Amino acid sequence: EGIYERIAAVDGDVKAFLALNKEEALAEAKAADERGYGDDAPKLNGVPVGVKDNILTKGLTTTASSKMLENFVPTYDATVVCKLREAGAIIVGKLNMDEFAMGASSETSYFQTTHNPWDLNRVPGGSSSGSGAAVGSRQVPATLGSDTGGSIRNPAAFNGVVGMKPTYGAVSRLGAIAMASSLDQIGPLTITVEDNALLLEVLAGHDPMDSTSFTDDVLDTNYSAKLGQSLAGLKIAYPVEYKSDVIDPEIRAAIDQAAQYFEAQGAIVEEVSLPNTEHGVNAYYVIMAAESSVNLQRFDGIRYGYRSPNAKDLDDIYVMSRSEGFGDEVKRRIMLGTYSLSSESYDLYYKKAAQVRTLIREDFEKVLADYDLIMGPTTTTVAFEIGERSEDPIEMYMADLLTVPANLAGNPAMSIPAGLNSEGMPIGMQLIGRSLDEATLYQVADNFE
Ligand code: GLN
């Protein structure tokens, strides 16, 4: 009940939620109370969680913030939602995002723009915009986001919260509306590091319905195992590319200060190089658009989703439904993607991008053979003003510079709060780990908190 009072008081300004699940949630809260909160209660008993609107929730609209799915009500829950419910968590409502997770500000949402709770004139980041802002404005303690090129970490940084993109394959993608299938991962955004680890312990695990999920003999889901352990002797890499002058000087200073803090804790911090960092965004936008264009083919105006009322024949159904149902950014990426996959440009674009992806993965492998983790900023700037970049896609894409490499390589990466800049806006620090080694990231994040 208190949660919905808080939402009523705050969300008129922040606009994080698209739909509330009040009736069901209150019934579940009652059931949680009846189960009690003793040692044998389920792990997340009674914990209110908000869910990004590209994650299917049975009986509750799931729109991906698109006109295409404006009235879509799923008939089943995503695996992650099932797992939350089994652990006793309560689904509070659905959260605004960039349309089909394409953007970094919520401005591509068909329904509304979410505002940054630290400064309502600024964007909350994206594409998990509502997921970041709802936690940042303390409407809920935890949310689910999805991260294809930074969409959990970017809003975590902009809203001063903790966000984890797990290792690719650690969390089931069944029931997540696919953007780019080789990059997408679902993960938690929370106020504290410990909460984040506990949530991921519930979310991760093999799903027989997702062939890209790791089997349980490979996964160690004891993510809170190292919380509270000393950092003495830990080797941390701070890449020179993450200190470049495209990074806002105040952010650079905050990360430098964090490096000094880690050294004071007994960790060894050294400069390394990830030479292909600057090619990440280029490779990402080719691969992501190619995969997205294929995934979006299912929206044909026939099986589900928007169908143009003006269509007169089959071709009209396809063309008019897609023309009217998708927004500009989605169309831009479909065109980019189908172009790079066409026979005359495949070698030049898609294949090249796939090669760059391998180089980026090798960069990480080399450094992480000698170091336990990599540190750096999450974003090059703090949250920018609403409208500032919405007319210039390339400017918007630059928000992803530091986050896309971990998606291309598959490594786990998180953003944690690293103080405020002189305007009082949150700064995010990114920690990138070895494949499947989220536990060390949580250890370092918890110590820094
Ligand atoms: N800003 C990135 C993009 O627009 C983030 C996408 C994502 O992670 N879903 O592609």
Image (tube, rainbow, N blue to C red):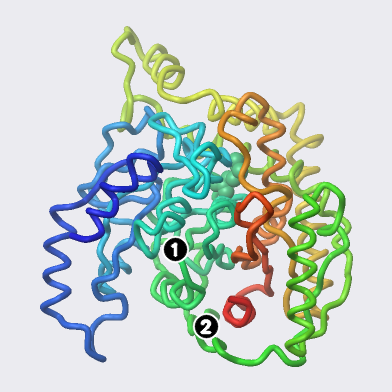
- Residue labelled with disc 1: 172
Q: Position of residue 140 (x, y in %)?
A: 35, 60
Q: Position of residue 338 (x, y in %)?
A: 63, 29
Displayed-image quarter of ligand 1: top right
Vertical position of residue 320 compared to residue 443: above or below:
above
| Front-most of residues 302 and 282 | 282
Question: Going 54% across and 50% down the picture, which residue do you hit?
Answer: 181
Question: Going 24% across and 47% down the picture, which residue do you hit?
Answer: 20
Given the image, on which type of amino acid does mark 1 rest? Ser
Q: Is residue 1 left or right of residue 307?
A: left
Quadrant assignment for the C terminus = bottom right
Considering the numbered disc 2 on the image, is that residue within a helix, a strand or a loop? loop
| Front-most of residues 238 and 147 | 238
Question: Going 23% across and 51% down the picture, which residue do you hit?
Answer: 58
Do tag 1 and tag 2 residues touch (Cβ < 8 Å)?
no
Residue 291 visible to the viewer? no
Given the image, on which type of amino acid does mark 2 rest? Asp
Q: Quadrant of residue 231?
A: bottom right
Residue 372 numbered mark, or none = none
Q: Is mark 2 within 8 Å of ligand 1?
A: no
Question: Going 32% across and 21% down the picture, which residue do you hit?
Answer: 307
Residue 220 numbered mark, or none = 2
Q: Quadrant of residue 89?
A: bottom left
Number of marks present in the image shown: 2
Real-space Cα separation, disc 1 to disc 2, in angstroms: 15 Å
| Front-most of residues 137 and 162 | 137
